[in-house]
Amino acid sequence: MHLLIIPDGNRRHSKGGGVSNELKYDSMMTNVASLIKGVGELNIEEVSFWMFSSDNLKRPPEDVGPFIRSLRKFSDWVQGKQGITTKVIGGCEPIEEILENMNKDDGGTRVNFLVNTKGRIELETPIDAVIRTGGELRLSGLDINGILDAELYFSDKMFPEFKKEDLKEAVLDIKQRQQRHGR
């Protein structure tokens, strides 16, 4: 199974809660790491995360700086994590060095990080299911090959609230569905 996760609702979750931007983005990256572990525990072969677009880097400096620092810490975690193969698809000039550090081949679960991907994304394997957090019922303009037959799962939980247990529930729901392909 190949999952695509759209981790939405991070900023909305932390609004009004007195959470610093640094902590907000650290929490997001920690949750991505936790879900990567959860995917491995569920024996899912591949997961793709829609990480961000260049539009995210147009936010105010007090938002962008903490995001970049959190991404750098996450990149270090990726390099230290064994048993995963990671690939960045797309790119973004201001943070290209960080993104390059996120590519590695260590066997195990394949993890793709989709970054600033304007236009059609070509993935090696088709997407079986899309999980989107944050309560929005859309795909955020993602144009991905192999997504036409994907099952869609929308969670009202903001991304920081979406934990491994929620991932397991979503995957079980998706696996119980039957695709008829018009029959």
Image: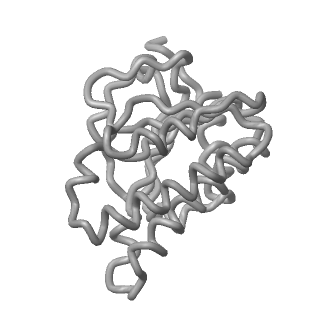
Identify the residue at horizontal 32%, vertical 38% (top origin).
Answer: 93
Horizontally, residue 24 falls left or right of residue 167, namely left
Above or below 128: residue 97:
below
Quick check: 76 above or below 105?
below
Q: Residue at the location (51% across, 25% down)? A: 127
Toward the viewer: 71 or 49? 71
Residue at the farthest front position: 97
On the image, the x and y values in percent for residue 154 come to: 44, 49
Tell me: 133 left or right of 179. left
Location of residue 78 in the rendering, given as x and y in whole percent from the top left corner: 65, 46
In the image, residue 124 sits, relative to residue 104, either above or below, namely above
Residue 58 appears in which quarter of the rendering? bottom left
- The front one of 155 and 11 is 11
Task: Give the residue displayed 70% in from the left and 28% down from the top.
Answer: 105
Q: Position of residue 25 (x, y in %)?
A: 46, 65
Q: Which residue, as the protein is rendered here, is positioned at the far top? A: 183
Quadrant for residue 145, please give it: top left
Q: How many marks?
A: 0
- Residue drawn at 66 percent across, 53 percent down: 77
| Spot occupied by residue 178 in the image (x, y as percentages of width and height) | 59, 26
Instruction: Determine which quarter of the picture holds residue 165.
Output: bottom right
Q: Which colour style is shown?
A: one colour
> Which quadrant would the N terminus be assigned to in this image?
top right
